[in-house]
Amino acid sequence: MYKEYFGLEEMPFSIAPDPRYLYMSEQHREALAHLVFGFNSDGGFVLLTGEVGTGKTTICRCLLDQIPENVSIAFIINPKLTVEELLATICDEFGIQYQKDSKSIKYYVDIINRYLLEAHAKGHKTIVIIDEAQNLSSDVLEQLRLLTNLETNKVKLLQIILLGQPELRDKLSRPELRQLSQRIIARYHLGPLSAKDVSLYVVHRLTIAGVKRQLFTSAAISKLYRSSRGVPRLINVLCDRALLGAFALGKNQVTASILIKASREVFGFSASQVYFRKVSAWTMTASVVIIVGIVFAAGYYNKKSSFEKTTSVVPQHQETKTGPGKENHASLQPAADSGKVEHMNADLLQWTDSLPVNESRGLAFQSLFREWGLEYDPSKHGDACEFAKANGLQCYDQRGNLRILTVLNHPAVLRLVNNKGQEFYVSIAEIQKDNVTVKTGTHSVKVSLKDIESFWLGAYSMFWKAPQHYQGEVKPGDRNILIPWLDKQLASVQNRTYQTRNNTLYDDELVESIKKYQVASGLLPDGIIGPQTLMRLYHEEKDHPPFLIKRAQAIRN
């Protein structure tokens, strides 16, 4: 109804799992990488879990869009089946002929095994995908495990992908299903979107639908995040209703008030009411706990006082007390000496330099350039990326997590927020075991990897050395001058004989080699040769500086 009004080519917020509309947040990239890794492995189970509406099915359909033609898929969407019904459904999906009145499990397993052997002989791969797998009974899950026993002398004949809600993880942790759990070769849990990702998600879907202007105000996006809690399916429902509301009112944008009204229509009450109900329930529970605690404390105090009076215990010495929050602060403050590294508690990781916080970005990049043997002065050299390009380096700005930083293995600049809500930039030069050296301004401190994640917003920047003639991503089927160099590098890494080639075609054989390398390196095996793949390839050269994790203790994923 509102499509023509807003100039949309199609409805942008349909809840159908259309892979074209999949917004690839860092979480979704990781989830897809796990599915692809499992898909490229031989046999076993792959597990993808997440709350209702987080995008599990859409990610799986995105995987299906990428699979080659020699793969047979059985997609089961109604898993509330008996063992016999499940086996019959698998036969239906693969087109296996069977006796409709058969009740024998052995009969079904035998004909499925015959089909799998024939498919394997033809070079075909066979996969069973089960959606809403939390509804599978223990008996059915055990039968699925037994199906993965079907094998030749070298490979498993069947792979099973399970998609389900968080209850599936709990079910698979039961003792009677431990054998199945041990056969899971890749697993990932998909959570809701962050506040920033919600905004990007809305823009992404509107762009795919043909509108590049922002149809939602910033205030509306904030309300959308709170109302949807970052769940994509709820975002779609709310945005659809809000656009309809804006159309009915003759508005060109969805405002916060329109979004609030849409939320009431969808949920039957406002998100704020839900919040206050939760707060009220929590307050009542907390009040009871506090009252009970006071009663017990009073009784304990009276008993303790009575005991102390009768025994006349006198302390042998007294400790000097400091004011609240002052204990040991002097010893924990970072030193001004830039060559000295101090160990800090995570809650003290904040901007303590005497310089203005708005200079933190320039200082962070100054430290990063020094790792590359370059002296950078923000006041003289201007933009860091322009200075990098002038010195033969490429800029790489992205969002991610500590896992991808260790995979890429390059020093980086991170954007942090401290416990005061203050944003600033730091550089990380080295990871040693569970600690990371962080440079804030002119200070260097060490914090644990786990602690820094609570301060990190996910944004990072790093520099990398691109091969000569690099002009951007190389995709399967492209012709590119880099292909001979890439083939030679991979041959060295994969210990195979390099056959001199003048062909610049990124052909299927090299694509498969790249995918294998990406999997071994902990990258998304998409076959695209971009910055991440090239960063890892440069790491294979012994004289390549600088490393985030020194070669002696490098993490190989």
Image: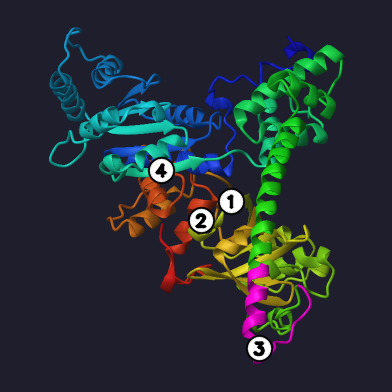
Q: Residue furthest right?
A: 250
Q: Position of residue 234 (x, y in %)?
A: 64, 27
Q: Which residue is mark 3?
A: 315
Work out whether mark 3 precedes mark 2 in sequence or the reverse, and give the earlier one: 3
Q: Nearer the viewer, mark 2 or mark 4?
A: 4
Work out whether mark 1 precedes mark 4 in sequence or the reverse, and give the earlier one: 4
Mark 4 lies on a secondary structure that is strand
Q: Which residue is mark 2?
A: 403
Residue 339's image quarter?
bottom right
Q: Residue furthest front?
A: 310
Residue 196's image quarter?
top right
Amino acid under disc 2: Arg
Q: Position of residue 163 (x, y in %)?
A: 42, 31
Q: Nearer the viewer, mark 1 or mark 4?
A: 4
Q: Are the residues at dot 2 and dot 1 in contact (C-beta closer than 8 Å)? A: yes
Q: Is residue 344 visible?
A: no
Residue at position x 54%, y 70% from top?
A: 435
Q: Position of residue 114 (x, y in %)?
A: 14, 23
